[in-house]
Image (cartoon, grey):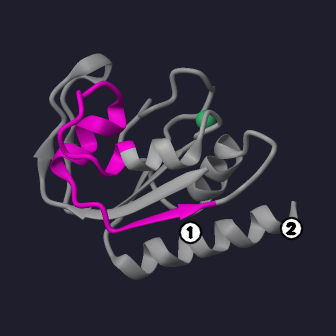
Amino acid sequence: MHSLNFPVGTAKYPGGSLGEINFLPGWYAYVGSAMGGLRGRIKRHLRQDKKVRWHIDYFLAVGMLKEIITVKSRRKIECLVSCYLAEKLPAAADRFSVSDCSCKTHLYLAPMEEQMRNAVEETLRKIKVD
Ligand SMILES: [Zn+2]
């Protein structure tokens, strides 16, 4: 699981399967997995000159990445993480990055940084208990 928190300005999501989305200013958390290799996946998120391919690529093109939190697990826990975040935060966009799962979204929005931090910290605590 990795979660990216970042503030973005209002920006339009340029399409793909989601159509156009207006992103409000605020703090966003994206939940993803990197079962094929965490280092490579994170490097990719940080690279500016990549080919835009996934939902998160479009988003990172308009947002500013502030932080990456990683959790090591043998299980695929990203959807569990997403469920916990959904209890605390509204979805930032429906069907964002959920092509192989039944979550409503993997992208969440908090207007203020503190709200985002609280939601992420509580989620991490819950994951450790599970
Ligand atoms: Zn999911």
* Vertical relation: 69 (above or below) 108: below
Q: Which residues are magenta?
A: 44-70
Q: Amino acid at mark 2?
A: Val
- Identify the residue at image location x=73%, y=39%: 76
- Residue 17, quarter of the rendered image: top left
Q: Nearer the viewer, residue 24 or 128?
A: 128
Is residue 79 found left or right of 118 in the rendered image? right
* Vertical relation: 51 (above or below) 8: above
Q: Residue furthest right?
A: 130
Q: Position of residue 43 (x, y in %)?
A: 39, 48
- Identify the residue at image location x=52%, y=49%: 39
Q: Position of residue 113 (x, y in %)?
A: 36, 77
- Give ligand 1's quarter of the image: top right
In the picture of the structure, the residue carrying the numbered disc 2 is 129
Q: Nearer the viewer, residue 10 or 53?
A: 53
As for residue 11 lying within the magenta part, the answer is no
Is residue 37 visible in this depiction of the protein?
Answer: yes
Q: Position of residue 89 (x, y in %)?
A: 49, 60
Is residue 92 visible in this depiction of the protein?
Answer: no
CB at disc 1 and ligand 1 closer than 8 Å: no
In the picture of the structure, the residue carrying the numbered disc 1 is 120
Q: Amino acid at mark 1?
A: Val
Q: Position of residue 4 (x, y in %)?
A: 42, 58
Q: Secondary structure at mark 1?
A: helix
Is residue 128 found left or right of 77 in the rendered image? right
